[in-house]
Amino acid sequence: MIRLLLNVILVLAVFFSCYLEEVVLSFRPPQAGQRSLFTLRLLNQTPAAPPLAAPDASEVEAALKPLPNAPALPGRWPLSGPWVIAAGETIIPFLHVLDEQDVRRIEAAHRSGGVLNAPFLLFTMIFVAGFLAVFRAALPHTRSRRTGSQNLVLTLLILHLLLLKALLLFTPLPAYMMPVGLLPLLLVGLNQSRALTVGAAVAASILSALFVDPTFTSLIALLVAGLTAALAANAMTRAVDAILPGMLIGAASAAVFSVVNFPAWQAVAEQAQAPLQLSAFNALATQPVIAGTAMAFGSAFLGGLLAPVFLPLLRATRYLSTTLKLRRFSDLDHPTLKKLFNEAPGTYQHSLGVAYLAQSAGDATGADALLLRIGGYYHDIGKILTPGDFIENQFNEPNPHDRLGPGESARRIIQHVANGVRLAAEFRIPKMVLKLIPQHHGTQLVEFFYDRALKEKSKTPVREIDFRYPGPKPQSLEAAILMIADAVEAASRTLAEPTRTTFDKLVRMIIVKRIADGQLSECDVNTREIEKIAKALVDCLEAMFHSRIRYPWQTRQPHS
């Protein structure tokens, strides 16, 4: 629902941005003495006429014809393109007091403008929004995909486009000085996947071109800057980490600007053949193409340096949002946990132990420790519906599996996952926690009943698939930790000698079995993280099974 709403906002924001100037000038025609409501960029082929000899409307329309190297889209104001040096470009700044000449210029441009092809615009925006959704769904099953949040991408994309439009409307900066590389830098800085960042950069370039300058040249320039930012971006844990990406984005923007304005560079090269004099250098430095190239580089570089400014705020906001959402479910007095305590007390104690183990392993590996603790609390809530099917809740009562076939027993054990997902949805448990419920078992085999089925003589062939959980396998580091912690907590209660040596052997055996069974094949967990997980779990088990001194009454010999 949130994703759909964000897509609608994205389409409406870009659509409105494309028509904002036309709509405002239609409802509030400019008048002399008023202040300009936004920055207007008017492209003239000839210099403006002097104020004392103001041209009539037909002369203004002729003067406003775009240059040959800066074609305007039919039905669009001839706004200046971001990558073209336009002789005679007139910028009416925001809040500038309009005179008669300004009014005539604006009216002539407005009459010659008309309206863009709205159906084509709308189709393009909807296509780009759909492209982002399909692009992420089509990414391969790697950690780079799973670290991508489409809601975050859409939110930042909307804010990025609104920022560009605001800069165009309320600053006199040329369009080629817009910080088009900021979005990819922010996404990578927020640990989003590189592939999803590239897709977002493509979408941002297309949508930006619709209201920045809808020409092929502008689109290519925006794509080059955006894709360079996506490839050059890094985690940016320090402010200095943005310098190199900023320089690469600046170099790419300057290169595109120079290529587009190659004829102007030829003219500068011919001028440079004159005798070397200080005046000649001054003349070269003031050449529009040189100044434009320098500004294209400088603005892109400075845009890259904005990323470390915004990243701490975005990280804090995202962490606060996630934390507030999860904190509501961390209280052990939550109705779901109280129900688990009353209906399945053994599972409740098991869940507390799993939460402790998982949180400790999360702290050791840098995973989301809060998510792991909450996931530990709720991972087995499906057992509320059939608590007697699980040994930790039987308390010396008759075991129902003694009278059931191994196939039926396995089915009832596996069913607690589906029950847990359904109960989690009913109790409105956060989606990030709900996803851990099926993943903490992955596609593991219910070994006890599978072995029993193999030993029984039956005419029906035993299929291994019937004794496996439906999955999916762990899709993140947090899900992998929860899977291991769940198995370790349960198995640790079977140890006859709870010592550090036996704990270490148990933990490593469980991890090796999960790896051999392919349960960790869909999450990017490296050997260094596995070692940290193992050590953290062993330390926790040693603390949980700590020894105590025996009381005198426990060692006192009975009287003969």
Image (cartoon, rainbow, N blue to C red):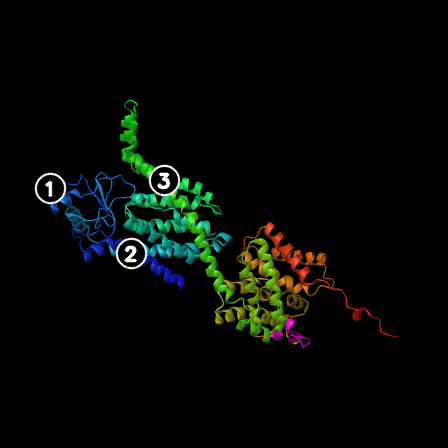
State the image coordinates of residue 484 (x, y, percent, origin top left): 61, 59
* Disc 1: CA contacts within 10 A as few (<14), some (14-19) or many (>=20): few
Q: Secondary structure at mark 3?
A: helix
Looking at the rendered structure, the kind of residue marked 2 is Phe
Query: How many discs appear?
Result: 3
Mark 2 or 3, nearer chain start: 2
Closer to viewer: mark 2 or mark 3: 3
Q: Which residue is mark 2?
A: 15
- State the extent of the magenta-drawn residues as a range: 386-402
Residue 313, picture quadrant: bottom left
State the image coordinates of residue 201 (x, y, percent, origin top left): 39, 49
User: From the image, which quarter does the C terminus lie in?
Assistant: bottom right
Mark 1 or 3, nearer chain start: 1
Residue 292, picture quadrant: top left
Q: Which residue is mark 1?
A: 53
Q: Secondary structure at mark 1?
A: helix
